[in-house]
């Protein structure tokens, strides 16, 4: 008989975890997840998980360090409760932008996080739209890398056709943008930019024809939105009819929502991989799509030993 499985959640995005459980027709696993007065994470698993396949849904979003530590403690608690295997479901993988040495004497923090997760006792990682695909190679355990593209495409096809143009915000995102343009049957454009410092980008040139077309910027995350808004303004100056942004992880730090409200972006399409703040939900320019059904299908296929790649053909 195939072993039963359980789904647990930390405090990072319990709404998403409950939605995943809803699609799978089961209750969220019972666990006490608290913090001591000094900020230490405390976890207690309140049900028998001996020999049970356990999935822990926990994006390591803001506050990144607290949510990461909470995930590590939950994995350790499950390991010491004899759960096996343990799968970390990370809709958003924090520290993914630090995947290489960009300057002398800087860390590769994404590799450090991979080592911490492995040392804690996780057996498999399920991640969505990693900032850099090579992060999968930082692990010596299986990593299932899925994409929000099916959810995004279901929405985009209701609004756009082949007359739109898919825009990559930089050279590194061309592969991602090309996958969208292929499925939508639209053309492709690339923004050539320089990044003199973190969260700062200078628009240099636009490669491709965007004049009199709806331009759809495709990226994995939006943080302060400075780069995104600069790209939208550049596309507008180059004749784009309207500018949309399709982003998986809506970090939206600082004054990002205000920047987007004051920009030429007509609509920002994001997912609930990260819990949405009230001001984000209230923004008339933000359209949030749920990835709960996609994650639930991935969890089901991992448990049953089925293919994940067929989700994205």
Image (tube, grey):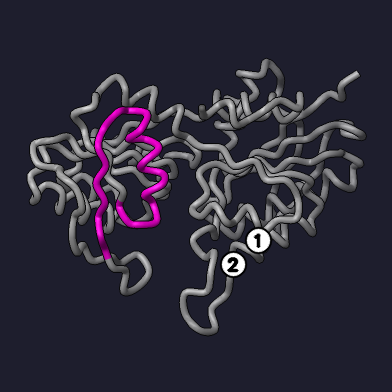
At label 1, counting other C-alpha atoms closer than 10 Å, the crowd grade (few under 14, some 14-19, many 20 or more) is some
Determine whether the residue tagged by mark 2 lies in a helix, strand or loop: helix
Q: Secondary structure at mark 1?
A: helix
Mark 2 vs mark 1, CA separation in Å: 6 Å
Q: Residue at x 74, y 44 (%)?
A: 124
The numbered mark at residue 254 is none
Q: For the image shown, how many numbered marks are present on the structure?
A: 2
* The image quarter in which residue 304 lies: top right
Q: Residue at x 74, y 40 (%)?
A: 87
The residue labelled by disc 1 is 113
Stretch in magenta: 169-193
The answer to whether one can see residue 266 in this image is yes
Residue 133, x across and y down, in percent? 54, 52
Relative to 52, residue 154 above or below: above
Q: Which residue is mark 2?
A: 109
Determine whether label 2 and label 1 are within 8 Å by CB: yes
Q: Is residue 187 above or below residue 153?
A: below
Return the residue nearer the eye: 155 or 311. Answer: 311
**Residue toward you, 42 or 284:** 284
Instruction: Specify the farthest residue to the bottom.
Output: 104
Q: Nearer the viewer, residue 254 or 177?
A: 177
Residue 138: x and y in percent read: 66, 59
The reply to whether the magenta stretch includes residue 157 is no
Q: Quadrant of residue 199?
A: bottom left
Q: Viewed as shown, does residue 22 lie left or right of 198?
A: right
């Amino acid at each position: 008989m195939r072993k039963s499985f359980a789904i647990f959640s930390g405090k990072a995005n319990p709404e998403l975890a409950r939605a995943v459980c809803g699609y799978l027709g089961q209750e969220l696993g019972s666990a006490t997840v608290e913090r001591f007065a000094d900020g230490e994470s405390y976890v207690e698993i309140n049900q028998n998980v001996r020999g049970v396949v356990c999935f822990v849904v926990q994006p390591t979003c803001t506050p990144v360090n607290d949510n990461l530590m909470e995930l590590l403690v939950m994995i350790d608690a499950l390991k010491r409760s004899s759960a096996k295997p343990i799968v970390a479901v990370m809709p958003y993988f924090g520290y993914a932008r630090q995947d290489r040495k960009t300057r002398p004497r800087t860390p590769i923090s994404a590799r450090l996080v991979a080592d911490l997760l492995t040392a804690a006792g996780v057996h498999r990682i399920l991640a969505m739209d990693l900032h850099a695909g090579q992060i999968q190679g930082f692990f010596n355990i299986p990593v299932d890398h899925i994409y929000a593209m099916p959810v995004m495409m279901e929405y985009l096809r209701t609004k756009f056709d082949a007359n739109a143009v898919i825009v990559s915000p930089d050279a590194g995102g061309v592969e991602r943008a090309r996958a969208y343009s292929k499925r939508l049957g639209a053309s492709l454009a690339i923004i050539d930019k320089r990044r003199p410092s973190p969260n700062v980008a200078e628009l240099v040139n636009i490669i491709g024809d965007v004049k009199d077309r709806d331009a759809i910027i495709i990226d994995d995350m939006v943080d302060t939105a400075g780069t995104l808004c600069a790209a939208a303004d550049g596309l507008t100056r180059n004749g784009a009819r309207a500018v949309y942004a399709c982003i998986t992880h809506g970090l939206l730090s600082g004054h990002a929502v205000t920047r987007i409200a004051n920009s030429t972006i007509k609509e920002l399409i994001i997912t609930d991989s990260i819990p949405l703040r009230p001001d984000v939900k209230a923004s008339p320019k933000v359209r949030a799509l749920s990835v709960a059904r996609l994650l639930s299908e991935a969890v089901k296929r991992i448990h049953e030993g089925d293919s994940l790649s067929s989700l994205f053909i």
